[in-house]
Amino acid sequence: MAKRIFDIIFSFLGLVILSPFLLLISLLIKLNSKGQVFYRGIRIGKDGKQFRIFKFRTMVENAEKLGGPSTAGDDVRLTKLGKFLKKYQIDELPQLINVLKGEMSFVGPRPEVPFYIDLLSEEERKTILSVPQGMTDYASLWNFHEGDVLKGSADPEKAYQEKIRPEKIKLQIKYVKENSFFTDIKIILKTVAKIFQ
């Protein structure tokens, strides 16, 4: 209950305080390239429920038809502004809307596309989806700039599956096992520190 109250209060405050900045980014996206302001891809949340995530669009129109779900830092689908937004995690800020709606939390395993959820074992799926999916967690702290790891790869999707995903799953399960309000606060503080490093 404390987690949900925290999410509601701080996601609302975050949206109010950041609203001028979010509006500016929205305008820049519209001026920078053709397409919608937000990317609204399908993600899998707690208990396997689907929802549409809010992210600032960082790619060209119809990017999902031009490549896989993994995004390298040098992905040709990224717009010039999109590269900047991803580098500083600004594209993730609209997920405050998902948190306010109760589809996500500030802290929890990062929500995945259905394709990756289907690849999980039954036990992994049951564990990871037993809590609300979040904006940050242990895996996010471990691999803060995922796109940089995939940069230069001839096959970003294969590199993601081999270099990132196995450790990501382990850290997501670690979070679920250690899940507590204190753990959430610790992860939030570490995430803020990472952003301003």
Image: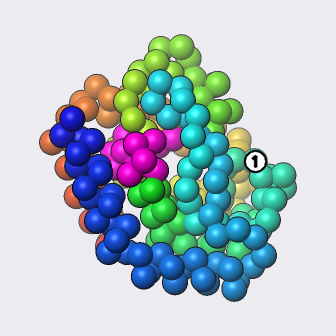
The furthest residue to the top:
122
Quadrant showing the N terminus: top left
> Is 183 left, or right, of 54 in this rendering?
left
Is residue 85 located in the magenta-colored stretch of the structure? no
Query: Quick one: SS at disc 1?
Result: loop
In the rendering, at what x and y percent does residue 75 appear?
72, 64
Say if 19 sits above or below 48 in the image: below
The stretch in magenta equals 98-111
Residue 122 visible in this rendered orientation of the protein: yes
Q: Name the image colouring.
A: rainbow
Say if 99 sits above or below 91 in the image: above
Q: Splitting the image into 4 quarters, where does residue 107 fall? A: top left
In the rendering, at what x and y percent does residue 126 appear?
46, 18
Is residue 104 located in the magenta-colored stretch of the structure? yes
> Is 32 left, or right, of 127 in this rendering?
right
Q: Residue at x 62, y 64 (%)?
A: 38
Residue 143 visible in this rendered orientation of the protein: no
Q: Residue at x 57, y 40 (%)?
A: 51
Say if 28 sits above or below 50 in the image: below
Q: Which residue is mark 1?
A: 68
Q: Residue at x 37, y 40 (%)?
A: 108
In the rendering, at what x and y percent does residue 127 appear?
41, 21
Label 1 sits on what residue type?
Gly
Quadrant showing the C terminus: bottom left
Q: Name the one closer to the observer, 80 or 12.
A: 12
In the rendering, at what x and y percent does residue 77 appear?
76, 65
Give the total number of marks visible in the rendering.
1
**Label 1 neighbourhood size at 10 Å, few (<14), some (14-19), many (20+)?**
few
Q: Splitting the image into 4 quarters, where does residue 131 fall? A: top left
